[in-house]
Amino acid sequence: MPSTFKALASITVWVLFIFGLLSLVGGFGRIAAGSPSTFLMSAYFGFGVASLFLSVVTMKLRKMLD
């Protein structure tokens, strides 16, 4: 696998991971602020969990292609 693809995969993993963590922190922040909107909280948590899951899958694929 060329080094360019390794670098792009690593960047993608980090972006997904950071986005996932920020989404989870935003969801917990909404709970702490007492936001009545459960739709927004579930969206934050849903995107956060999905993003973390996709970052793990992407890293596994990168490791498989080495």
Image (cartoon, rainbow, N blue to C red):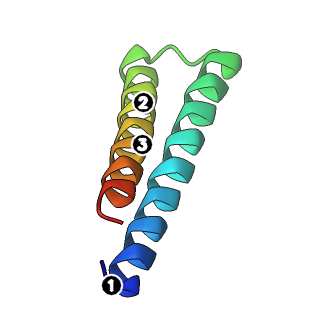
Q: Residue at x 45, y 35 (%)?
A: 48
Report the side of 28 relative to 55 (left or right). Answer: right
Q: Residue at x 33, y 84 (%)?
A: 2
Residue in the foreground of this view, choosing between 34 and 53: 53
The residue singled out by tag 3 in the image is 56
User: Eyeballing the image, is 65 above or below 7?
Assistant: above
The kind of residue on which mark 1 rests is Pro
The residue singled out by tag 1 in the image is 2
Q: Quadrant of residue 54?
A: top left
User: Eyeballing the image, is 63 above or below 42?
Assistant: below
Mark closest to the chain's N terminus, 3 or 2: 2
Q: Are marks 3 and 2 in contact (CB under 8 Å)?
A: no
Mark closest to the chain's N terminus, 3 or 1: 1
Label 3 vs label 2, nearer the camera: 3
Residue in the foreground of this view, choosing between 33 and 62: 62
The kind of residue on which mark 3 rests is Val
Image location of residue 24, percent across then percent down: 56, 32
Residue in the foreground of this view, choosing between 54 and 60: 60
The residue singled out by tag 2 in the image is 49
